[in-house]
Amino acid sequence: MSIKFATQFQARQYNVSNAVASARIEGIVPTKQLEQNLTDYVAGKKSIAQILEETKQRYVTLRRR
């Protein structure tokens, strides 16, 4: 079954909702930072590539401490 979306916002919201639901089923609770990043993604403020790069940079910074 194909789902048609009226806007990119709706498509992103649908995909994010499904991803978060799948994670929660697996027992993974999203952090506040991830929730904010996903909100920014849905709103079109950030791309997935940007979120991944920011996450990598935080990880590298934490490892250097």
Image (cartoon, rainbow, N blue to C red):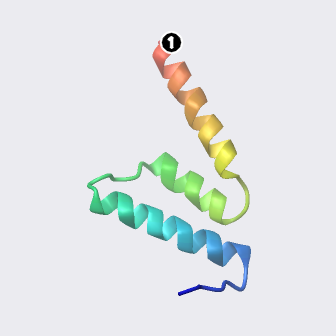
Foreground pick, 2 / 58: 2
Q: Which residue is mark 1?
A: 64
Residue 62, compared with residue 31, is above or below; it is above
Query: Residue at 51% across / 26% down in the picture?
Result: 59
Percent coordinates x, y for residue 10 in the rendering: 64, 78
Q: Residue at x 28, y 63 (%)?
A: 25
Q: Amino acid at mark 1?
A: Arg
Quadrant in the rendering for residue 54: top right
The residue at the point 37 percent across, 63 percent down is 22
Residue 41 appears left or right of 17? right
- Left or right: where 53 falls relative to 19: right
Q: Secondary structure at mark 1?
A: helix
Report which quarter residue 39 is drawn in.
bottom right
Q: Residue at x 70, y 52 (%)?
A: 47
Q: Number of marks in the image?
A: 1
Relative side of 29 to 1, left or right? left
Viewer-proximal residue, 3 or 7?
3
